[in-house]
Amino acid sequence: MPDWESDLGRGGKGERVLMKAFNMTKSNDLRWDLNTRFNKKLELKTDFLAHKTGNFAIEQFSDKDKKSIGGIDRAVRDKVDIFAFLVWEERKAYFWKVKELKEAVDKAKVEFISETRNEKDGRVWVTTNYIIKRQELQGSCFKMQIIEPKYFK
């Protein structure tokens, strides 16, 4: 079963890497993760499996039963500017304009939809993700950069 606190901690590691590598700051607004030095709102997903699976997991619902949107749809709703994936093991960061990633996700072939059962403080919910081949989406990113190892320390 996923460990909510552990996943948050791993996401925080990714945020710290981007903050150091690209001179970003942590957002005080919970609707996005980071602010770029150009005052853009950035949502980051730190991925520890894409190097093995060849896929990106794009959250569909943060709570399936409540139909609470997540991922790219939430980023569109919240007027986030940039959506990024950090593929941890490869030290690769992919950056998309949110609306362009949304269009690419809508056009992409979804390999399958994963369901993850979550539990915290007695509450149980299911998160769903679109599983999409990386090559389906990486062509629409405006920047891909390999990050120097020193930022991962």
Image (spheres, rainbow, N blue to C red):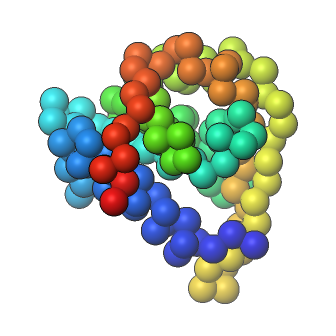
Q: Quadrant of residue 109?
A: top right
Task: Locate residue 36 relative to residue 107 in the image: left or right.
Answer: left
Q: Position of residue 111 (x, y in %)?
A: 83, 31
Q: Position of residue 140 (x, y in %)?
A: 52, 14
- Residue drawn at point x = 79 percent, y = 54 percent: 115
Is residue 111 placed above or below 3 in the rendered structure? Answer: above
Task: Locate residue 85 relative to residue 54 in the image: left or right.
Answer: left
Judge by depth and name the residue closer to the eye, 109 or 121.
Answer: 109
Q: Position of residue 63 (x, y in %)?
A: 66, 57
Q: Residue furthest bottom?
A: 122
Quadrant (top left/top right/bottom left/bottom right) for the C terminus: bottom left
Q: Position of residue 88 (x, y in %)?
A: 51, 47
Task: Locate residue 1 relative to residue 121 in the image: left or right.
Answer: right
Is residue 95 visible in the rendered structure shown here? no
Q: Quadrant of residue 7?
A: bottom right
Is residue 8 visible in the rendered structure shown here? yes
- Residue drawn at point x = 18 percent, y = 42 percent: 23
Quadrant (top left/top right/bottom left/bottom right) for the N terminus: bottom right
Q: Residue furthest front?
A: 149
Judge by depth and name the residue closer to the eye, 69 or 43.
Answer: 43
Is residue 26 placed above or below 109 in the rendered structure? Answer: below
Judge by depth and name the residue closer to the eye, 142 or 81.
Answer: 142
- Residue drawn at point x = 40 percent, y = 60 percent: 13
| Number of numbered tags placed on the structure image | 0
- Residue drawn at point x = 65 percent, y = 40 percent: 51
